[in-house]
Image (cartoon, rainbow, N blue to C red):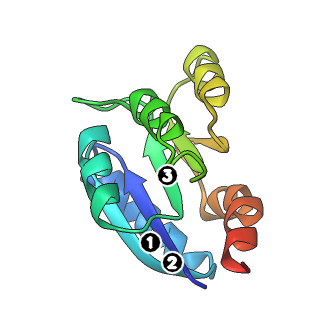
Amino acid sequence: MDSDVLVVDDSAAIRKILTRVLRQTGMAIQTIHEAGDGQEALALMAQHRIDLVLSDINMPKMDGLQLLASLKASPQWQNIPVVMITTEGGETKVAEAVRLGAAGYVRKPFTADQIKEKLMGILEPAATL
């Protein structure tokens, strides 16, 4: 079954780049949803089945760490893998994301190969269920 992915970033340009990169991976992805912050992401997730979240860490309203904490605290969404996409140079926020249950992270700027490599172990098993 093809997966539905949610891309969360306050930059529309980054969301478009990630969407293009996801399509280029050749992975079994059906729909790619986009949200500009964590609040928008939660509202979208209430309306759609999401199999994977790619989220920026630094965003207005609700940042990626707050979104991750909300997802992991929800019985409905706690098992959805979340990969953080970040410009964070320091390890503090990345370590916090891992502690909160992130499935991994990719640093900006990223390449299509980096995204595909990170998602191979996460998305493919879910796609074969």
Alpha-carbon distance for marks 3 and 1?
Answer: 13 Å
For label 1, the SS is: helix
Q: Which is more foreground, mark 3 or mark 2?
A: 3
Discs 3, 2 touching: Cβ within 8 Å: no
Screen quadrant of the C terminus:
bottom right
User: Which residue is depicted at the point 64% across and 18% down?
Assistant: 91
Q: Are marks 1 and 2 in contact (CB under 8 Å)?
A: yes
Q: Is residue 63 above or below residue 8?
A: above
**In the picture shown, does residue 66 fall above or below 42?**
above
Q: Residue at x 63, y 58 (%)?
A: 115
Question: 39 or 74: nearer the eye?
Answer: 74
Per the image, the residue denoted by label 3 is: 54
The numbered disc on residue 23 is: 2
* Rendering quarter of residue 93: top right
* Residue behind mark 1: 20
When the figure is inspected, residue 105 is found, relative to residue 24, above or below; the finding is: above
Query: Residue 54 appears at what percent x and percent y?
Result: 49, 51
Q: Residues within 10 Å of mark 1 (few under 14, many from 20)?
A: few
Judged by depth in the image, the label closer to the viewer, 3 or 1, is 3
Residue furthest to the front: 75
Query: Which image quadrant is residue 52 in?
Result: bottom right
For residue 89, what is the image quadrant?
top right
